[in-house]
Image (cartoon, helix red, strand yellow):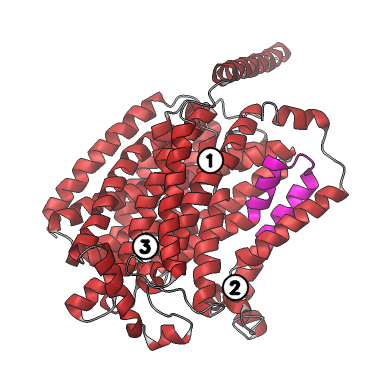
Amino acid sequence: MLGINDPWIWGAYILCILSALLCVVYGIINWNKGAEHEEEEIMEEIEWHEKEKEMEEKELGIWDEEG
Amino acid sequence: MDALVLSIVVIFYLILIGYVGYIAWKRTKSSEDFMVAGRKTHPYIMALSYGATFISTAAIVGFGGVAGVYGMGLLWLTFLNIFVGIFIAFVLFGKRTRKIGHNLSALTFPEFLARRFNSKFIQYFSGLVIFFGMPLYAAAVLIGISRFIETTLNIDYNIALIGMAIIIAVYVVFGGLRGVMYTDAVQGTIMFFGMLFLLVATYVLLGGVENANQALTNMANLVPASAAATGSTGWTSMPALGSPFWWNLISTLVLGVGIGVLAQPQLAVRFMTVKSNRELNRAVLVGGIFILVMTGTAFVVGALSNVYFLQNSGQIAIQAAGGNIDKIIPLFISVAMPAWFAYLFMVTLMSAAMSTMSSQFHVQGTAIGRDVYETIFHKKGEEGSSIWIARGGIVLAVAFAVIIAFIAPPSVVAQATAIFFGLCAAAFLSMYICALFWKRATKTGAISGLLVGTFTSIFWLVFIHKKEAEALGIAKMLFGQDVLITSMPWPVVDPIVIALPLALIVTVVVSLLTQPPKKEHIKKAFKGV
């Protein structure tokens, strides 16, 4: 097959192509899936970032008070 | 090849990449930006960035050259690259890494593991393994591109080496990951078309798929006696089962790199840069095709170069390349392909080298800046100090890589890559799998697996696996013999075959013997998974 006699080699040759096809099919089927929580996550991240900032400012504030 | 034309092509290319990098740099403001590109990355950019980082000159020049010696059996690695490196990595590992990374707001791979297991030790120990292990891989990539410049332009190897290192260092230090990802995507596109042309041109040159493969099959009787004695049976048939040739092909090259890819810090960090699973789903499509064209082409062309060299010089590839595996692909391109393609291929290889090395150095920089410095000294990155430590770390990492590239022997590219991939798998993979899929895994279990995997792997390289043990000479110095176990197959069994299962068993057993992790922490980490 394909000029190769050893089935372990032409098998690998074919498997490479099939696995790439699997990726393509998977990608197409799930093209629009999985973005359900996107906004929620971005909001969460912004919130964390602000909390962290606040915490730091507080810490710095305490430092200032103590001189 | 004309040096002037090449210089113009390279300069034009560097201006393009420099421009993209500069735009990205201007947008990099905080240390969070620098680390994960603000988590808002387009799927095409994400997939090509992952692919371009995954595939380097080590894969094209190093493993392509290896295919010139080992033949198409190496296509098993392409299969694993696609099925494990893309499909499993994105669908099973990527989605959970992204979600858990988000829940724990982790920015680097060591930080991800550390926060998941609540252990600072994991973070700085992993950071150190990466910082000191990765130069080996970076050197392999650097050697790959330098050998191409040396072969096609007749420029001194050492000059090529230093020139490339300087270009890449400047490019990375002023980019950060956002720059890295955008330039990666441009480079990935160039690589894709360069390799696609190479595949088609090679098959056309040799009379079509069936004819070319058949001609290679017919060459089986030309396998050198030394290779036949260790198990080689030809370029389109598997080596004799259990022979040294077979063990090296299967355990080191195919498994080491094919499985090791799952625990590559510079790849895993990319899962944390996408905003939703949808991007990962889409990236699977782009990534699958990209890897097929990259490594599929490199390995098929590497093997088929034997047919070309036989027809034109009466020699097999490794003889034509003067015995240096790393020169097979560069030589094939410069003698068999049209001149204009050699220029394009130079740009393809520069893209492959720069995209991988930029991520390697970037990961090393963050390893030393965030994972080691910030973790040990409890400094926050906001005021910018860790960015500068990270940038200093990058310069140091480049220096390490250049030194290794200077002293490395010939035919080393694929081997060095495989060692690093294997080390990452041994050290991180068991802990990473448990972090994603096993809530009962404990901090002590994870640390035990990390230590056992790392040190078993290093021990095996220094004292058991013949190739490295012999080259290092430590076993010889201490015990008067090259390896501690001489009976077959142990001197040819790759460390990953021993270290990875051992690390996995230790992680599981120690976890079961220790107190389960706190419920709130697990709930937080796995929220929405």
Q: Which mark is residue B493?
A: 2
Q: Are marks 1 and 2 on the same chain?
A: yes
| Mark 3 lies on residue | B299
> What count of labels does the image hold?
3
Membership of B447 in magenta stretch: yes
Classify 10 Å Cα crowding around label 1: few (below 14), some (14-19), many (20 and above): many
Q: What secondary structure is the stretch in magenta mostly built from?
A: helix
Disc 1 is placed on an element classified as: helix
Q: CA distance from mark 3 to mark 2?
A: 23 Å
The label nearer to you, 3 versus 2, is: 3
The chain ID associated with circle 1 is B
Residue at horizontal 50%, vertical 38%? B270
| Residue B369 visible | no
Instruction: Please identify the quadrant where the N terminus of chain B is shown.
Output: bottom left
Estimate the x, y position of residue B263 in percent, counting from the top left: 58, 49
Magenta residue span: B427-455
The label nearer to you, 1 versus 2, is: 1
Q: Does label 3 or label 2 sit earlier along the sequence?
A: 3
Q: Does label 1 or label 2 sit earlier along the sequence?
A: 1
Residue at horizontal 40%, vertical 58%? B58
Amino acid type at circle 1 is: Phe
| Mark 1 lies on residue | B90
Disc 2 is placed on an element classified as: loop
Disc 3 is placed on an element classified as: helix
Residue at horizontal 51%, vertical 32%? B273
Residue at horizontal 79%, vertical 44%? B442
Amino acid type at circle 3 is: Phe
Amino acid type at circle 2 is: Val
The chain ID associated with circle 2 is B
Estimate the x, y position of residue B314 in percent, counting from the top left: 21, 81
